[in-house]
Image (spheres, helix red, strand yellow):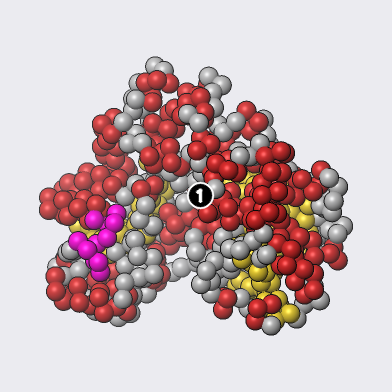
Amino acid sequence: MSIVVHVSHEAIQKMGGIGAVLEGLLTTRSYNEAVERTLLVGPLFSGADLGALETISYHASEGINITPHATSLSDIEKTYHVELIYGQRQFESKDHNIPTLVDVLLVNVSNSNEDLTNKFKWQLYEHFGIESNRYDSEWEFEEYVRLAEPAFEALKVLTSEHTETPMYLISHEFMGMPLVLKAQIERENDTGASNMHTVFYAHEVASIRPIVEGHPGHDVRFYNALEQAKSQGKFIHDVFGDPFWYFKHALIEKAHLCDTIFAVGDLVVDELRFLAPQFESYPINLVYNGIPAFEMSLDEKLNSKSRLQKYARTLLDYRPDYIFTHVTRLVKSKGLWRDLQVLHHLDSLLASNGKTAVLFILSTEIATGRPHENIHEMEREYGWPVYHKIGYPDLVGAEIELNNGVSAFNMQSKAVKVVFVNQFGWSQASCGSRMPIEMEFMDIRKGSDAEFGQSIYEPFGIAQVEPLSFGAICVVSNVCGCCGFIQRAIDNTDSPNVVIADYTFVNGDPKSLEDVLHIGLTERTNIEVENSRDIAAKLLGRLPRKNRDIEEMIQQGYDIASRMSWEVVVKDYFLPGLKNAL
């Protein structure tokens, strides 16, 4: 048995991808059979909802100290000028309805001891060459550096009865690296960290994302450059300049000092090895993300699809034969313009076959959702979500550019229309009176014939393949980390449930690294237009024609998803990876 400590900004509640990973890992039977105790460590954010905790055992400012460690925790608070909250959080498995209770340690570092922080920053420089002064204005860097020492001392207190039990400190992304490096220092000094083993969990490679997103050549340029650089023994600084301007790079570049590294996708492994020579021969463990696997009947599928068709008819005055969906965050990396490029080719193909379709894009920059009264008002005034207006409560930020593309597409398309729903949620309460009252969020997953997810940077991509067990065709780009897991799950055969778009393929191999680095908007667009034609043809060929086809898609999708479940991930990847840290 062992103790596992997860360091993340999502210690108290699920907010994004890492939260989904924690939920997936911690609710499996295999994890709970192998791990004696789990602690989630993170900063206490302003306005954090402490109601998300099942119980609170220590919160001095509220007079709560029902733990035998209260005195020791109070001493840490006084020494480091921090506030500690220690409690328990419950996770529940969607598959087994088994509650899992884990410990949570939150640290408020807003007024921490500056002298001790500066001493620790000097240690980071002395031991690891990290120049903290370069990142003084970056609160995320500062926050996790300040958290490291009080969190380390609190962990020693809270696990003092288990000093011989192996403890794994897992840094989810850059956030836990200062704490991990603190443990490395103490282990070197033989000061109470001999049972601590350190893990860097790469949910992405933060140094790479801005390179891909920030240049118009996007993934076409970067991944071809990566291949060229590998063959020439070059690293990130040789090709793209000094990456140490970015505080996240300064921390993750030290991940090779950990006892082991987890990477959520095959390309993440390649990207890590691109960071520095020390990663070249480092034994990086593939630990894919899991996806849900739900059994579903044909009737359930058809009922959900019928609700989506009914909604489309209300909005567009026709009942589409096919329902396409894209449920995603509204960020550049998701490559939403590629959906429209595929649909441009698919439109004429469907029209010639006498078929129609609709694509529902569910994405927004207002993560908390727009007030219901605003939604109803926009519905009445100008026909939202088919029509939009710039400015809150409607289009804001990146929503404007996406809607411009959607409007331009809808003006010229014949068989396919796109509905951009820039709202959080999928129900009549969230999305207005024109949505069927019986509609619920899972309908957009269950009723979909195809889910799009052709990202330009996607270390894994859980959302893209969530509808797999519901019989949807998942259209993903080859840079998505889930592709590697899919290929393993289907033994590198071809599956009708998955269409993999390769936008990084360049006709006629570029002659040099210099050629690749000159790939820009024009070259990328030409490649996307050409490749999206092939994707449209593949998708048309795989769309189900009869109920029997749908049933087969459901069964095949469930079989694949079952081989990609969190239980499989923990048993075959996560736990063996932890052993490598020993």
Q: Is the residue 503 above or below the residue 194 in the image?
A: above
Examine the rendering and report whether any part of residue 547 can be seen.
no
The residues colored magenta run 390-400
Q: Would you say residue 398 sits in the magenta stretch?
A: yes
Q: Position of residue 232 (x, y in %)?
A: 53, 19
Examine the rendering and report whether any part of residue 455 can be seen.
yes
Name the foreground residue: 475 vs 69: 69
Name the foreground residue: 573 vs 221: 221
Q: Residue at x 31, y 50 (%)?
A: 336
Q: Residue furthest top?
A: 511
For label 1, the residue is 137
Residue 10 occupies quadrant:
bottom right
Q: Which amino acid does the dot numbered 1 rest on?
A: Ser
Name the foreground residue: 461 vs 115: 115
Dot 1: element? loop
Q: Residues within 10 Å of mark 1 (few under 14, many from 20)?
A: few
Q: Would you say residue 526 sits in the magenta stretch?
A: no
Q: What secondary structure is the magenta-colored segment mainly?
A: loop
| Quarter of the image where the N terminus is located | bottom right
Judge from the rendering whether residue 505 lies leftward or rightward of residue 83; answer left or right: left
Q: Residue at x 39, y 41 (%)?
A: 213
Residue 106 occupies quadrant:
bottom right
